[in-house]
Amino acid sequence: MALTKTEGLVIKKTDFRETSLIVLFYTKDYGKLNLLFKGIKNSPDKFASNLEPFSYNEIIFYKKKNTTLHLASQCDLKDNFSNLREDLDKVSSASSIIELLDTVMPPEDPNRDAFNLALESLKNMSNYPSADKILTIFKIKLLDLVGFKPHLDSCIICQEKIITQARFSISLGGLLCQNCFKNDLKARPIFRGTTATILHIERNSLEDNLRLGINPQIKKELDYILESFLEFHLDKRLKTKKYMLEINQNIKILKNRR
């Protein structure tokens, strides 16, 4: 077994027998990685981290061969994003970032750009007023990084540049020109500003994109396209979004009862 050091964001943790935990990280050098923390329930001070979801840690572990479960030796907390955790909307957005990493990234397939994007997004989310805007930027840039994104440069069927009206096909995963509308009768019209915004976000840094003004109507369409695209092509709805909708509905019900 080789003793190895890396940095990682906690995706989730699960019980392992009576005294231990298995923690899934998204790491800087190894991608998505399962680590066994032996005896942590009996000796919580054994590791200098509480291993909360989306916390940022420095990890030393034994990397085993022929297995996807490796043994943690040391884990030191670098940032718990405590300011972020005081805001329900920010917690929701941060959790969505982590869930999306877990969903689209394969096990033990390193992607430093994806790790750095997630870490930078969480750090900015702690102080930036609109966590939802950061989440939208993160989704677009992550899909671009992994090559799993809507086709917006031209018509997805004929590859011609779209000069006039366009529609977006969820099932085909991209834009349709007028001549190709017949290929998906359910395709919906899309604002030019929406496609321009996605392409701008793909081509610029997170810091530059935070200065980008997004029209509320375009933001609404962006959210619809990204959610629909992910749900259709992943064949699942991200759980965080569903849970937070339920929580917000319950909060509204409690407020109305007062």
Image (cartoon, helix red, strand yellow):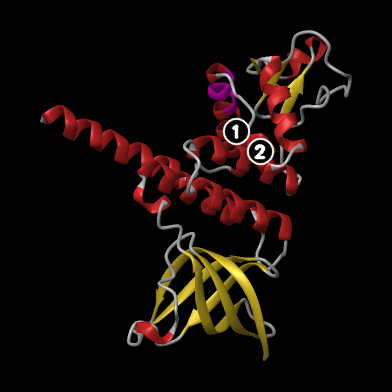
**Crowding near the residue tagged with mark 2, few <14, some 14–19, many ≥20 C-alpha atoms within 10 Å:** many
Mark 1 Cα shell of 10 Å, populated few (<14), some (14-19), many (≥20) = some
Disc 1 is placed on an element classified as helix
Image quarter for residue 219?
A: top right
Residue 205's label in the rendered image is none
Q: Quadrant of the C terminus?
A: top left
Which numbered disc, 1 or 2, marks the residue that appears first in the sequence? 2
Q: Residue 140 carries which label?
A: 2
Specify whether 67 is left or right of 92: right
Q: Residue at x 71, y 38 (%)?
A: 149
| Quarter of the image where one finds residue 92 | top left
Tell me the kind of residue under disc 1: Leu
Q: Residue 176 is drawn in which quadrant? A: top right
User: Is the N terminus in the top left, top right, bottom left or bottom right quadrant?
Assistant: bottom right
In the image, farthest residue toward the bottom? 1
Question: Which marked residue is nearer to the observer: mark 1 or mark 2?
Answer: 2
Q: Nearer the viewer, residue 240 or 17?
A: 240
Q: In this view, does 205 lie to the left or right of 61?
A: right
Three-letter code for the amino acid on which mark 2 is drawn = Ile
Contact between marks 1 and 2 (CB within 8 A): the answer is yes
Q: Is residue 172 visible?
A: no
Q: Helix, strand or loop at disc 2? A: helix
Residue 110 in magenta stretch: no
Q: Name the residue under label 1.
A: 226
Where 70 sits versus 79, above or below? Answer: below
Which region shows up in magenta? 218-222
Which SS type dominates the magenta stretch?
helix
The magenta stretch spans residue 221 = yes
Front position in the image: 50 or 12? 50
Q: Residue at 45% x, 86% y: name it.
A: 38
